[in-house]
Image: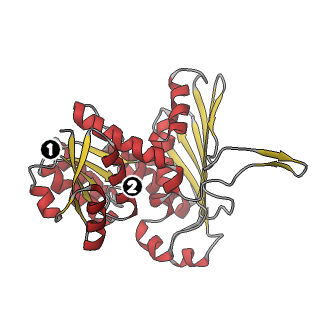
Amino acid sequence: MGVRFGLLGAGRIGRVHAKAISADSQARLVAVADALPDAARDVAAQYGSEVRTIEAIEAAGDIDAVVICTPTNTHADLIERFAKAGKAIFCEKPVDLSLARVRDCLKVVEATGARLMVGFNRRFDPHFRAVRAAIDEGRIGTVEMVTITSRDPGAPPVSYIQNSGGIFRDMTIHDFDMARFLLGEEVETVQAAAAVLTDPGIATAGDYDSVSLILRTASGRQCLISNSRRATYGYDQRIEVHGSLGMASAENQRPVSIEVASVTGYNRPPLHDFFMTRYTDAYAAEIAAFIAGVTAGATISPSGEDGLKALALADAALKSVAEGRAVRVSEVLNG
């Protein structure tokens, strides 16, 4: 029978997860809910599912798990509701924009024994996972420095930015999770610099579009993160891990990986221009991992605690920019 799913939110990312669920032989998309009835009907028709309300999915005996793709300000409430309903839960990041609210939510998850996975899809990218495998196999020795470059082709609308929690909680949070994934130690301090260089409207919204960060662990391992909302050449996604015995890196990906040499030089196709195409394999792999974890009763990762720690790094970065100093993560976690 496999894992029977309810999908909450039939927007852009919800459709990605609906496709991944339906492509997995161990899962079935039973029902779809969305505040926009047409969106729910469209996805349900495409995958042979029913349109139901969130309340109906919550009470349903024929649904084992839910995928939460609704707006961020609904995530924590929905996690708590479905934890109490006995469903396994996959939730897009973040759990909430408030550390206190995330803590309260995770207490409910723990008390109910619910299974929760947070959608940090980049952990499942095959190229990034290969770098992590090289670390685990000892091929580059002890990790010393990590470099993460993550730049978007263009900024989202200012109306989105105003409700997103800002660049650190919305964009860099993926890189914070990747830093933890690759460093092998928890981050102790965050030093951040931020500016608005691409669109004055972003400053009006109280946010930044260009940020640089140095993360440091207790042992001295470092991670450098570079973010920009404007990369005219495409969706720039690279990582490099330097170790005591060598280095492992993952280069940018292109829809077509060829190179043409002529008298004008060496030419390669442009990069992916959107996260939806760059991380297609990652989205499918994370849902497959969630399904496998639910089916086997195994530990599910990334966990709610991973979501909490990534958000704490974002809050530390904001505090660093505001105060012009390196901020200990404990200041925001224990504040």
Q: Can you say whether 49 is above or below 247 in the image?
A: below
Whether residue 326 is visible: no
Instruction: Determine which quarter of the picture holds residue 250.
Output: top right
Q: Position of residue 280 (x, y in %)?
A: 47, 49
Which residue, given by chain and number where applicable, does mark 1 sit on?
A: 111
Where's the N terminus, which quadrant?
Answer: top left
Return the residue nearer the eye: 276 or 115: 276
Return the residue nearer the eye: 220 or 9: 9
Q: Position of residue 292 (x, y in %)?
A: 29, 35
Which residue, given by chain and number where applicable, does mark 2 sit on?
A: 16
Q: Position of residue 103 (x, y in %)?
A: 27, 51
Which of discs 1 and 2 lies nearer the camera? The answer is 2
Instruction: Determine which quarter of the picture holds residue 131.
Output: top right
The residue at 53%/79% (across/down) is 204
The residue at 40%/63% (across/down) is 12
Q: Can you say whether 286 is above or below 11 in the image?
A: above
Instruction: Determine which quarter of the picture holds residue 234.
Output: bottom right
Q: Earlier in the sequence, mark 1 or mark 2?
A: 2
Determine the CA span between mark 1 and mark 2.
31 Å
Number of residue marks: 2
Furthest-right residue in this view? 263
Return the residue nearer the eye: 182 or 115: 115
Tag 1: Cα neighbours inside 10 Å, few (<14), some, or many (≥20)? few
Give the amino acid at mark 1. Answer: Ala
